[in-house]
Image: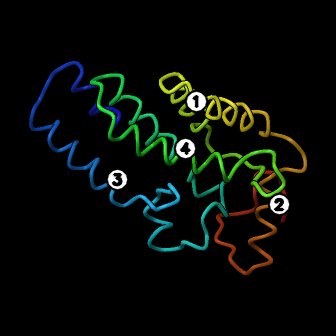
Amino acid sequence: MEAVAWSLCQTPDPDLEKAADELIELIAAAQCGDGYLNTYFMLKGPQERWSNLAECHELYYAGHLIEAGVAFFVAGGKRRLLEVVCRLADHVCTVFGPERDQLHGYDGHPEIELALTRLYEVTQERRYLTLANYLVEQRGTEPHFYDIEYEKRRQSGHVKSYGPPLGGAQ
């Protein structure tokens, strides 16, 4: 989607733009009421949301979708996908952070931090920049979030893993 936005900026293509607009409407229609948006977890494992950040890349995918929303807005002024990704980012801001009832983790592949920073640049919503900074600062802290996450999955019997977490717990 991001590549499509930048492509349309360089070379207008009404057919490609129409296809993108239709896909954006499908994405918007699929979004959960709380702003969450990841069709795998929505359809296959809703109870497993945000339970395996090291391997399932929910924040990574969210980051790339946010980048696409920003690109459509910057490249052509289109707000529809930007509205969708702001709802997604708002959801991420409620789930992750320093508060007791929030997750203190970060993604296995950094991307969400860049995307939230770019989203801040176009919206001036400080919470996006604050969360991006928080996620960067959490990376590498001890105890390793992935060890804690893995242990929770192991205790619940929901270990879907390709090996021990990056922090080293067995």
Q: Judge the density around disc 2: few (<14), some (14-19), many (≥20) Cα neighbours within 10 Å.
A: some
- The tag earlier along the polypeptide, 4 or 1, is 4
**CB atoms of marks 2 and 1 within 8 Å:** no
Q: What residue is shown with label 3?
A: 28
Q: Quote the CA–CA distance across marks 1 and 3.
A: 21 Å
Compare marks 2 and 1 and give the one earlier in the sequence.
1
Q: CA–CA distance between discs 3 and 2?
A: 33 Å
Residue at the far right: name it: 142
Amino acid tagged 1: Glu
x, y percentage for residue 68?
A: 39, 36
Q: The residue tagged with tag 3: helix, strand or loop?
A: helix
Q: Nearer the viewer, mark 2 or mark 1?
A: 1
Instruction: Give the SS element for disc 2.
Output: helix
Farthest residue to the top: give it: 10
Q: Amino acid at mark 3?
A: Ala
Q: Which residue is mark 4?
A: 89
Res 125 label: 1
Q: CA distance from mark 2 to mark 1?
A: 31 Å
Residue type at numbered disc 4: Ala
Q: Secondary structure at mark 4?
A: helix
- Judging depth in this view, the residue of 37 and 101 nearest the camera is 101
How many C-alpha atoms fall within 10 Å of the one at disc 3: few (<14), some, or many (≥20)? some
Residue 139 as seen in the image, left or right of residue 114: right
Q: Are marks 4 and 1 in contact (CB under 8 Å)?
A: no
Q: Residue at x 57, y 52 (%)?
A: 57
Q: Which residue is mark 2?
A: 148
**Distance between the Cα atoms at labels 4 and 1?**
11 Å
Label 1 CA crowd tier, 10 Å (few <14, some 14–19, many 20+): some
Question: Is 93 on the left-hand or right-hand side of 156?
Answer: left
Q: Residue at x 75, y 54 (%)?
A: 103
